[in-house]
Image: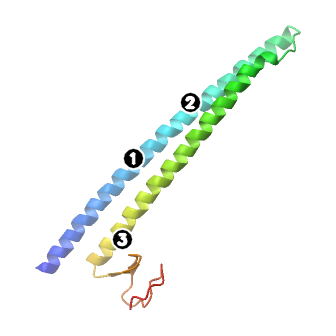
Amino acid sequence: MGLLDKIMNKDEKVSQLQGELSSLQLRKESIVSAIQDEINKLQNEKNSVFCQAGMKAYNSWCQGEPDTSGLSAFWNKVIELDQAIKEKQEKKAEMVARYDEEINLIQSNISISMAVANGGKVCPSCKAVIKESDLFCEKCGTRVG
């Protein structure tokens, strides 16, 4: 009966980890999507500034006033928006990396739990799943047999 209890506990653990994994993946998608929406809004604003600058330059040209000094405010706004876009892209990359790290950890725990539940072995050093016949861990090289 003890072995059955161990298997049941492992199944419950795997199920719990799979739920956490699913939840984490949904949160990642939601956050990445929200940040991408912010980037898209900034890009649209930048496009609008370019359009406004183009209209101002065109109107000046049509009136025979090729003076473009009045456009510097537009270019400053474009530079500001480019910086904001860059910061959002960096934040998005950071969030993706952070979530991927957590996701990989949970996936590793699921693999370990399933291997142990099925009578498999785990490397004592790096916790990678190893075959019964292995003498060394394929991941870290630790002697296991």
* Mark 1 Cα-neighbour bin, 10 Å: few <14, some 14–19, many ≥20: few
Q: Observer-nearest residue: 82 or 54?
A: 82
Q: In which quarter of the image is residue 142?
A: bottom left
Q: Specify which label sits upstream in the sequence, 2 or 3.
A: 2
Q: Quadrant of residue 107?
A: bottom left
Position of 144 relative to 21 (above/below):
below
User: Which residue is label 3 attached to?
Assistant: 111
User: Which residue is label 1 attached to?
Assistant: 27
- Residue 41 percent across, percent down from the top left: 56, 30
Q: What type is the residue that disc 3 sits on?
A: Ser
User: Which residue is label 2 attached to?
Assistant: 41
Taking the image as shown, residue 58 lies to the left or right of residue 145, namely: right
Q: How far apart are marks 1 and 2 (CA)?
A: 21 Å
Q: Do the residues labelled 2 and 3 touch (CB within 8 Å)?
A: no
Q: Quadrant of the C terminus?
A: bottom left
Position of 98 relative to 10 (above/below):
above
Position of 80 relative to 115 (above/below):
above
Position of 113 relative to 122 (above/below):
above
